[in-house]
Image (cartoon, rainbow, N blue to C red):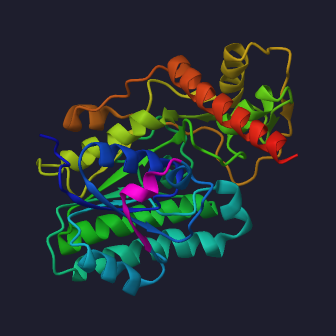
Amino acid sequence: MSFWLNKQVLVTGATGFLGFWLTQKLIASGASVIAFIRDHNTQSELYRSGLVKEISVVTGCLENCYDLERTLTDYNIDTIFHLGAQTLVGAAAKAPLLTFEANIRGTYHLLEACRRYPGALERIVIASSDKAYGSSPILPYTENMSLQGQFPYDVSKSCCDLISKCYAHTYGLPISIARCGNLFGGGDLNWSRLIPGTIRSLLTAQSPVLRSDGTFIRDYLYIADAVDAYLCLAEKMSQQGVVGEAFNFAPSRPYSVLEIVHLLQDILECPHIEPIIQNGARCEIKEQYLTSKKAEGKLGWTAKYEMDVALEETVVWYREFLSKKTRQSYALC
């Protein structure tokens, strides 16, 4: 029987990219999912796919502790995946206060609600990021490195990470932390991100616009691997040495921005469409990538998808999505 059968699972940020895919997998595994969301975003996959009809939805703000306490109690929650956050680096640089409120205050309000919750919480998985490490001359990042974000988004993730460890070690909450790099796959409609933005540009015969000089290096983790990582971490939290710990989840190797663009050009057979390189990226670290040896050793997790296969599946999703949008536009004319 599925580990998740009849579990009462709270997912914050379920209208987000990772939130949708994780919710979908949990439902397929027999869990009862309660989505804690701020806005009813009908453009998100949670709504477009109709999956929202299969879950319970609570509308609230992470900045409001009462909303969180009520949700935990009313739905008898035993598992939490805390994904709700402001996730865009550029938006954080423009509006740091909103990012700090959502990411930092939102995290300690959730964990304070958990501390006061009279029920039995069995597992809390916190979404952190490779950005929590900040800039380092030594790569790849390992879990024993200090967290020293400098830019607004990075600082918010460093704080979220440290607050989570505080509640785990001080109050004994069953918390584990997931640190991933950039996630990609079908369903991400943040076109400012490299992979969806580049695919859309190439499919419409336009030049992709790159904020950086193209040499920035990142981990790009396929969404199916990320979902498996989160579920694996949650399922292994009864094992010694997992609660109160952070785990990196990374693909087989990092890629530069231009490498990703060239791979997509090959898949879409349009090498003649060259990118526009703006070289104006702000508040971004030049090189960031993780090692997931700790996750491999303690959790038995490794990324399963090769980059070319993952990108091909992603292109299929966006091709269908954009062609459908085009048909809808013509129908309205």
Looking at the image, which is closer to me, 177 or 3?
Answer: 3
Looking at the image, which is closer to me, 20 or 69?
Answer: 20
Q: Report x, y in % for residue 203.
A: 77, 27
Q: Is residue 118 above or below residue 331?
A: below
The answer to whether residue 303 is magenta is no
Q: Report x, y in % for residue 59.
A: 47, 75
Q: Report x, y in % for residue 261.
A: 71, 25
* Span colored in magenta: 49-58
Can residue 290 be seen here?
no
Q: Is residue 186 above or below residue 75?
A: above
Q: Residue at the far bottom: name it.
A: 66
Q: Residue at x 37, y 69 (%)?
A: 163
Q: Residue at x 63, y 26 (%)?
A: 315
Counting the numbered discs, the total is 0
Q: Quadrant of residue 244?
A: bottom left
Q: Looking at the figure, which quarter contains the N terminus?
A: top left
Q: Is residue 311 above or below residue 189?
A: above
The answer to whether residue 57 is magenta is yes
Please give left or right for residue 25 compared with residue 208 in the image. left
Looking at the image, which is closer to me, 117 or 92?
Answer: 117
Please give left or right for residue 41 compared with residue 28 in the image. right
Q: Is residue 50 above or below residue 330?
A: below
Q: Residue at x 51, y 36 (%)?
A: 289
Can residue 171 be seen here?
yes
Q: Report x, y in % for residue 197.
A: 73, 38
Q: Quadrant of residue 304?
A: top left
Q: Residue at x 23, y 83 (%)?
A: 116
Please give left or right for residue 35 compared with residue 318 in the image. left
